[in-house]
Each structure stands twice: as structure tokens, then as C-alpha cells.
């Protein structure tokens, strides 16, 4: 890259998970011509896991991230179960579905309000809203009961105290007043009120994990089932009282999604339709699939199907085989790693390597050297292709495979917004897809719960299969893959077991797929392509970059899960700044 070209740097770009840096090269009109996505921190989970008991792997792997708190636990136990051909009881499958579903609903609502909404909602503008008009607006959109003029007046008063005290607190550092904000003051006030409501709601609904998994974040799991037994006569097991609490939590989750999250998404989207034609660039989408009706090994029963869509062609779903060495591979040609077979090799995760080799600049530095290695993220590819994973991929997959509810929701959304189906492949489409899939999973929760209750009433309370618990029952060598759909996309853990111990372990993670750097062919990753063409209104306040990158819901703790060795370089955070000439 031409070092003299204007470059806008945003680092860190995420609000809670700040190890992602974007460098965007712009032309004379402040249009993004090329973009580079870099993970700036390295950890070491895959190295830590080697040599351990595979039955313990979930507890380590789960520490990859505290946001998608349970997904690495699930992927890990599924990997061991796949390697050992270990069946889990029907109730364990249902409890896992309920826990994964709860994770989605919690995480997606939190993302929308607390990590993404302020790219679209101007908090300071809410101060000029008329609370009575805000109440009218809210009541025209939804039956959510917290919608009186007094309620909005109270929220506005709280907000005014923050602003007048010069203490925006959680709202500090926004680009308030930026002309790219388009909501009227009343819509801004309504969204801020729901931001605050969502904080309280998310704390409460996390209890589902504590009931089934003992705690949140990082609920407990077990290879062969789920850890908490069902025993209606015990105070220290899943009993009738706990099950009634779960029912209550499911209702609260669905109510918030139906009455707040979905109507807010549609209302806000209506003001930002220009974002329905930019912000998606690869056109390729990958899902591993999730939510099995029965065992994980029958892909036909997955609520989210497995497959790949290429070039936005929804008429063909390509089959995905996670064991095939020619399909999923990770490349490191532009990442700070070495590979035994050479820097340009692609390795299937069974043969994956984690050899750290930082070759980037020493801090303080102005720019990364994007012509060589520039990230701690590897570049995963499917049959050599860069693909996008996550909510948009899942909604497209459900839509393409004929899921009736997905079709109805997508069609309703497009009709309400007056947009064509192509609009899905965009920043707005990605954010809407996250909301729509939350609705599908929230509704599915009731079905899994009802089935669990029916099994218990029929006398089946089994939650754990001890048949293969003892390593003496295992083959000397085994390997398997645990897959799932994490909130941010397709997640796989590949494990190689030798003589009862972990010989190799590789996690290929959603944000690695989306945020990874260029590969040996020079193909950019999903974030990098998505930014190309964005017109920056003001390079010193690049809200356009935030909108598109946040629409993916970046999580770099997940993506770079590999301990900083010794005193190797960790670049310091820098704030947004245009490069000279921009
Ligand atoms: Ni740390 Fe995660 C999810 C996983 S994404 S949030 O969802 O896996 O990289
Ligand atoms: Mg990895």
C-alpha cells in the first residue's frame, strides 16, 4: 500500500472488546478504497489445551470469551463427543438448545442496544424530545407497557443530569450531533429508554444459565450430557420450581423481543434505508448449523441448516463437510504466525498449528505494515473462498432452505421498509437479520421447553450418559469436531485425542472468519471488503466505519484466542485520527 495515501485509523473499534483495529485507505473524496482489519492482541488457549484431559477442555476453552459465554463450552464438549462417538440423552440436547437459545437472545439484544444502537441513535438529541410525543410514537409501534409520557420524561431527566453534569458516563465518546444521525428526537429518546431497560432485562434473563449450568457467565458443561440433574424431589437439582422459573424467563425473553427489540429495529431501520445497499461485499455465506431436534449428528434436524451460499445465489446450498481436509482451512500468510509446511500453506484444523511470530512494528507506531503480516487473526477459508458467517448467513440459509417463519419475517421486514430482497446483503440487512433470527430462536425456546416437560412427565429425567466417561473405554487415537452457531457465526473446535490426552486442539471462530486479514491470494476478509466504497462524511469522526464493523458484532477475544508470550509487543490503543492528507 502506498504509505502516502490518506488512511483513517480506528483503534480500538469495539466498545467492550477492544482489540480490533481498522485502517482504511481513502481517496480524495474521503471514499474508502481499501480496508485492513487487524487483531492486536494474542492469547494462547490452543497452546494451553495441549496435553490436558479432553473432558476438561470445555472449562479452558470457555475462557476464550466472556461475551458469548457458553459457546466455546458447547463446541468443546461436542468435539469430544464427536471424537468418541458419544451419544447424549434427549433431555441434554434440549437443555443445551435452551441454553444456546438464551445466549443468543441475551447477546443479540445486548449487541443491538449496548454495542450498536449508538451508531444510529443520538443520545444528546433525545434531550430535546417531547415526552408526550415519544409516548405516542412508542404506543403506535408496540404494546410494551413502559410507554407513558411520565416514563419518558423520567428517562429524559436522568439523561439531562448526566449531560449537564458533564458526565455522560456510559454515553461518553459518541459522535453526538454528527449529521449522519437521522432519527427525530422522540425516536432517540425512545431508543435511549430501551437501552436502559435492556440493561436490567439482560441481567435477569441470564438466570436461565444459572439454573441449568450453575452460573453465568461461563455456565458449567459436561461431556456426555448436562451437569445439573433433573429430580423433581430434590432441592439441589432441576425441580418443579426451577422449571417454572425457566418458563417465566422464556416468556420475559419473548416479550422483550416482540415488544421492544423487533419494533425498535424496524422503526430505526426506516430512517437508514441507504444502509440497505452497502456494507456487504463477499456475497459468500457459511453456516455450520445448530439446534438439533434430536442428536447433533443428523444435520437434517438442525433448525439452522448447514451449508454455503456463493455469490448471493440463494437457489443453491453447497454441502459442508467439517472433516474434509480440503474444505475448512486456516491461512497465516498475513498473520503473525509461522506454519511448519510454509507461510502460504492452508492447514485443516486437525493439522492446525499455533506458532506465534510477531513481525509487526514496535510501538508507538502510526500505521501497520499492511503489505506483510498485520494481524493476530488467521484467515479461515472454505474451499479457498472467503465467506461471511453470522446472523446474515443464518437468515439467508433459513430463507433459502424454506424455513416458513424465516420467509415470513424477511418478507414482512422488506415490505415494511419497502426494500428488495437484495437489501439483505448490507449493513442494515445484517443488523435486521440479527433481530429476525432472535425472534425465531425466542419462539423455538417454548417448543424445547414443552418437549423437556413432556419427557419428564413421561418419566424420562435422564441428562447424562456415563457409558464413555472412563478414558479406558476410548480408542488410543480419536479425533472429532464440535460445531455450533455462536451468536457471531459458525464456530468449530477440532480435537485430536491420543492416549486419553489432547494432542491437538484448534478453534476456528466466527470473528476470525469475518475479521481475518488477507490470504495468500490477496483475498480480503469480510470486514475488509464490507468497508470498501463507504463515503466518509468526516474522516475525523468515521461513524460509517463503526456502523458497518459493529453490524458484524466483532469479538476479538474469540477471534484471537491464542497468552501473550513474555514481553512481546501489544500495541497501545490509539484514538481515531485521520492520517496526514486526509
Ligand atoms: Ni467473544 Fe464469540 C460469538 C465465538 S465470536 S463473542 O458469538 O466463538 O468470535
Ligand atoms: Mg484458532
Image (spheres, rainbow, N blue to C red):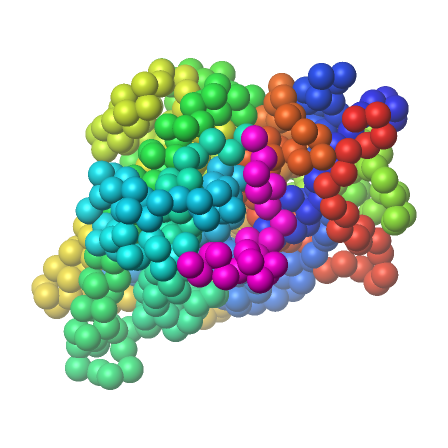
Q: Tell me where residue 433 appears, x and y as whole percent.
A: 39, 34
Please name the residue shown 28% across and 25% down the image: 416
* Position above or below: 258 against 22: below
Q: Tell me where residue 463 appears, x and y as whole percent.
A: 28, 66
Based on the picture, tell me whether residue 136 belongs to the magenta stretch: no
Q: Is residue 253 left or right of residue 526?
A: left
In the picture, residue 429 is in which quadrant? top left
Q: Say which quadrant the N terminus sits in.
A: top right
* Position above or below: 9 against 174: above
> Which of these two is toward me, 123 or 549?
123
Q: Evaluate whether residue 20 shows in this view.
A: yes
State the residue lying farthest toward the left: 458
Please name the residue shown 73% across and 41% down the image: 576
> Which of these two is toward me, 122 or 281?
122
Based on the picture, tell me whether residue 177 belongs to the magenta stretch: yes
Please name the residue shown 67% across and 62% down the image: 48
Q: Evaluate whether residue 392 shows in this view.
A: no
Q: Is residue 355 left or right of residue 528?
A: right
In the picture, residue 146 is in which quadrant? bottom left
> Which of these two is toward me, 404 or 580?
580
Figure disc tally: 0
Please name the residue shown 48% across and 25% down the image: 275
Q: Is residue 150 left or right of residue 68?
A: left
> Which of these two is toward me, 433 or 336?
433
Q: Which residues are magenta?
A: 157-179
* Position above or below: 384 against 56: above
Q: Tell me where residue 34 appears, x and y as whole percent.
A: 71, 23
Q: Say which quadrant the C terminus sits in.
A: top right
Q: Tell me where residue 209 appears, x and y as whole percent.
A: 37, 65
Amino acid at each position: 500500500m502506498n504509505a502516502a495515501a490518506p488512511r483513517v485509523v480506528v483503534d480500538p473499534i469495539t466498545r467492550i472488546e477492544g482489540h480490533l483495529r481498522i485502517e482504511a485507505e481513502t481517496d480524495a473524496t474521503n471514499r474508502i478504497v481499501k480496508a485492513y482489519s487487524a487483531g492486536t492482541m494474542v492469547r494462547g488457549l490452543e497452546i494451553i489445551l495441549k496435553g490436558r484431559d479432553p473432558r476438561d477442555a470445555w472449562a479452558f476453552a470457555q475462557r476464550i470469551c466472556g461475551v458469548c459465554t457458553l459457546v466455546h463450552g458447547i463446541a468443546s464438549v461436542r468435539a469430544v463427543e464427536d471424537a468418541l462417538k458419544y451419544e447424549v440423552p434427549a433431555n441434554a440436547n434440549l437443555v443445551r438448545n435452551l441454553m444456546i437459545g438464551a445466549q443468543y437472545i441475551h447477546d443479540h439484544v445486548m449487541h443491538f442496544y449496548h454495542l450498536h444502537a449508538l451508531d444510529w441513535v443520538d443520545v444528546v438529541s433525545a434531550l430535546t424530545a417531547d415526552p408526550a410525543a415519544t409516548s405516542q410514537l412508542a404506543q403506535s409501534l408496540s404494546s410494551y407497557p413502559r410507554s407513558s409520557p411520565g416514563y419518558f420524561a423520567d428517562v429524559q431527566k436522568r439523561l439531562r443530569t448526566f449531560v449537564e453534569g458533564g458526565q455522560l458516563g456510559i454515553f461518553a465518546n459518541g459522535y453526538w450531533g454528527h449529521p449522519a444521525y437521522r432519527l427525530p428526537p422522540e425516536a432517540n429518546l425512545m431508543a435511549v429508554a430501551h437501552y436502559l431497560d435492556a440493561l436490567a432485562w439482560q441481567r435477569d434473563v441470564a438466570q436461565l444459565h444459572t439454573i441449568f449450568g450453575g452460573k453465568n457467565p461461563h455456565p458449567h458443561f459436561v461431556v456426555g450430557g448436562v451437569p445439573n440433574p433433573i429430580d423433581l424431589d430434590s432441592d439441589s437439582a432441576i425441580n418443579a420450581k426451577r422449571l417454572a422459573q425457566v418458563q417465566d424467563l422464556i416468556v420475559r425473553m419473548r416479550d422483550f423481543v416482540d415488544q421492544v427489540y423487533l419494533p425498535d429495529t424496524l422503526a430505526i431501520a426506516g430512517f437508514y434505508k441507504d444502509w440497505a445497499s452497502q456494507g456487504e461485499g463477499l456475497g459468500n455465506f457459511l453456516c455450520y448449523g445448530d439446534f438439533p431436534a434430536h442428536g447433533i449428528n443428523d444435520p437434517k434436524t438442525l433448525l439452522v441448516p448447514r451449508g454455503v451460499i456463493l455469490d448471493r445465489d440463494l437457489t443453491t446450498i453447497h454441502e459442508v463437510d467439517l472433516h474434509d481436509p480440503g474444505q475448512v482451512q486456516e491461512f497465516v500468510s498475513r498473520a503473525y504466525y509461522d506454519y511448519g509446511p510454509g507461510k502460504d500453506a492452508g492447514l485443516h484444523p486437525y493439522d492446525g498449528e499455533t506458532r506465534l511470530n510477531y513481525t509487526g512494528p514496535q510501538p508507538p507506531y502510526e500505521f501497520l505494515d499492511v503489505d506483510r503480516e498485520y494481524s493476530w487473526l488467521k484467515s479461515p477459508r472454505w474451499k479457498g473462498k472467503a465467506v461471511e458467517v453470522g446472523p446474515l448467513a443464518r437468515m439467508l440459509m433459513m430463507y433459502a432452505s424454506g424455513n416458513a417463519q424465516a420467509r415470513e419475517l424477511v418478507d414482512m421486514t422488506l415490505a415494511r421498509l419497502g426494500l428488495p430482497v437484495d437489501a439483505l446483503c448490507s449493513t442494515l440487512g445484517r443488523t435486521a437479520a440479527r433481530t429476525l433470527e432472535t425472534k425465531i430462536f425466542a419462539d423455538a425456546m417454548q417448543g424445547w421447553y414443552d418437549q423437556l416437560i413432556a419427557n419428564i412427565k413421561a418419566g424420562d429425567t435422564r441428562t447424562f450418559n456415563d457409558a464413555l466417561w472412563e478414558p479406558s473405554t476410548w480408542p488410543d487415537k480419536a479425533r472429532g469436531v464440535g460445531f455450533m452457531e455462536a451468536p457471531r457465526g459458525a464456530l468449530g473446535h477440532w480435537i485430536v485425542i491420543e492416549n486419553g490426552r489432547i494432542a491437538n486442539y484448534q478453534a476456528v471462530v466466527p470473528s476470525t472468519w469475518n475479521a481475518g486479514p488477507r490470504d495468500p491470494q490477496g483475498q480480503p476478509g469480510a470486514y475488509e471488503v464490507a468497508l470498501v466504497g463507504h463515503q466518509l462524511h468526516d474522516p475525523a469522526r468515521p461513524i460509517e466505519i463503526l456502523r458497518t464493523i459493529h453490524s458484524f458484532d466483532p469479538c476479538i477475544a474469540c477471534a484471537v484466542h491464542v497468552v501473550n508470550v513474555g514481553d512481546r509487543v501489544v500495541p497501545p490503543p490509539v484514538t481515531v485520527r485521520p492520517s496526514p492528507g486526509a
